[in-house]
Amino acid sequence: MQNSLDTISAPKSCPCANGEVSESRRKVMRRLGWGAFFVAFSSVIIGTLRFFFPRVLFEPPTRFKIGKISDYPSGQADKHGVVSVSERFMESQRVWIVRESDKLYAIFGKCTHLGCTPKWFTDELVYKCPCHGSQYYSNGVNFAGPAPRPMDRYGISVLDDGRIVVDKSELYTVTDFDDERCYLKASGEQK
Ligand code: FES
């Protein structure tokens, strides 16, 4: 019996016998402790940096200048009172600048059916939507296809130096077309 106990007891050469195991365990625990400390410390630093450098979404400005009223001269009007439709800002801003005999306004080039971009046909004096066939007169009023209402218009105003500004953050639907913020008198006078 004594012999069998001797066989399972630790040999003298075993590290646990002279405290090496507990020492290495302490080292491991110390390293783990430092590791946890650095992880927590890094989280605090990163959180602080994020506070000073927040993630910002840079969006294009909503206001843009379109020149002066003299850049949109009067002339012969069609049967809807429209003298000219300028496509100068269509590609960059998705906006048509429409001159009538006595006013100027900015049409948002978005079909009121499902939002496609219509095309302006100078020879026919109509806008046509390529998606489901809606059509609009030169003043943006719908007359064919599934579009439920005229195309919307943006806010428009004149600066002190006479330059005209279109504001895409202001959108007006047909019920607001008489609102003086969505058209300019063609004289260009401040309203
Ligand atoms: S999106 Fe223009 S007709 Fe449907």
Image (cartoon, helix red, strand yellow):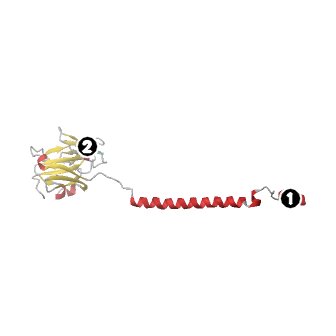
Q: Residues within 10 Å of mark 1 (few under 14, many from 20)?
A: few
Tell me which amino acid carries mark 2.
Glu
2 vs 1, front mark? 1
- Point 20% across, 43% down: residue: 88
Is the residue marked by circle 2 packed among few (<14), some (14-19), or many (20+) residues within 10 Å? Answer: few
Q: Earlier in the sequence, mark 2 or mark 1?
A: 1
Q: Residue at point 19% right, 45% down?
A: 137
Element at badge 2?
Answer: helix
Pick whichever, 79 or 49, lies toward us: 49
Q: Quadrant of the C terminus?
A: bottom left
- In the rendered structure, which amino acid carries the disc numbered 1? Asp
- Front position in the image: 44 or 15: 15
User: In the image, is residue 88 above or below residue 22?
Assistant: above
Residue 65 in the image: state x and y as whole percent. 20, 50
How many callouts does the rendering have? 2
Q: Position of residue 190 (x, y in %)?
A: 12, 57
> Circle 1 sits on which residue?
6
- Circle 2 is placed at which residue position? 91
